[in-house]
Image (cartoon, rainbow, N blue to C red):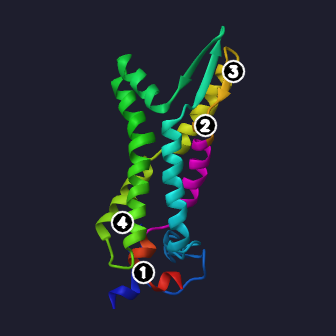
Amino acid sequence: MTGHLVACPECDALHRRRALRRGAKARCVRCGAVLYRHPHLHPDQLLPLVVCALLTYVIANVFPIVDLQIQGQTNSATLYGSILALWREGRELVAVLVFATTLLFPLVDLLAMLVLLLTFRRGRPATLWRFVEGLRPWGMIEVFMLGMLVALVKLSHLAHVLPGVALWAFAALTLLMAAILTFDPRALWDDPEGAFR
């Protein structure tokens, strides 16, 4: 019986679970909070996006983000090199925050989502689902991308800025992550078969 009921995450009102159209969401009648939603994408459609995002992540972190040309000298900047430079300058806290929010958390989120999608038919990995839900707010690829674009516009007055492969990879990764984050992993837990008919 409890499998057919859903509690509102805001006001704890109980509602009977009903089938939804693809992309629709159920809201609490008392407070209007989202109770659950029917995903736009089937997990089999989301899996290639996650794999593509992982490959794009590797490209974004291996190749230079920008090449700066100042007075005939060229310098390349990678994200990892920038984090090391922050650490060497004595800004350890900023370096750790940049490392965590732009390298570590997005990678762990993508890997956890990959495992979740590969194993959802074998069982209901509640611990992994809760882990993904708790981790998502800390991945800040889109904030990093916005900051990078602002910095490049300001640097363009001082030096000749050539966008690197990693800059385009970060742009693609931002779009892929936005598509992946629209998927609610609760659908795998709540109704692993019925949610994707």
Task: Name the amino acid type tagged 3.
Answer: Ser
Dot 4: element: helix
In-front residue for pair 58/107: 58
| Residue 89: quadrant of the picture | top left
**Residue at 67% across / 23% down in the picture?**
161
In the rendered image, the vertical position of residue 39 relative to residue 81, given as above or below: below
Q: In this view, does 25 lie to the left or right of 193?
A: right
Residue 86 is covered by the magenta coloring: no
Type of the residue with mark 1: Pro
Amino acid type, mark 4: Trp
On the rendered image, what quadrant is the C terminus found in?
Answer: bottom right
What residue is disc 2 on?
165
Specify the label residue 129 is tagged with. Answer: 4
Q: At label 2, which amino acid type do we have? A: Val
Q: Is residue 24 above or below residue 46?
A: below
Q: In this rendering, which labeled residue sits more in front, label 4 or label 3?
A: 3
> Is residue 168 left or right of 88 when viewed as pictured?
right
Residue 12: percent from left, percent from top: 38, 73
Marks 3/1 in contact by CB < 8 Å: the verdict is: no
Give the Cα separation between the discs numbered 4 and 2.
33 Å
Q: Is mark 2 on a helix, strand or loop?
A: helix
Magenta segment boundaries in residue numbering: 169-185
**Label 4: few (<14), some or many (≥20) within 10 Å?**
some
Real-space CA distance between mark 4 and mark 1, rounded to the nearest whole angstrom: 13 Å
- Residue 179 is one of the magenta-drawn residues: yes
> Upstream in the sequence, badge 4 or badge 3?
4
The N terminus: image quadrant: bottom left
How far from the left and from the top, in percent, is residue 165? 61, 37
Cβ atoms at labels 2 and 3 below 8 Å apart: no
**Disc 2 and disc 1: Cα gap in Å?**
38 Å
Give the residue pinned by disc 3.
156
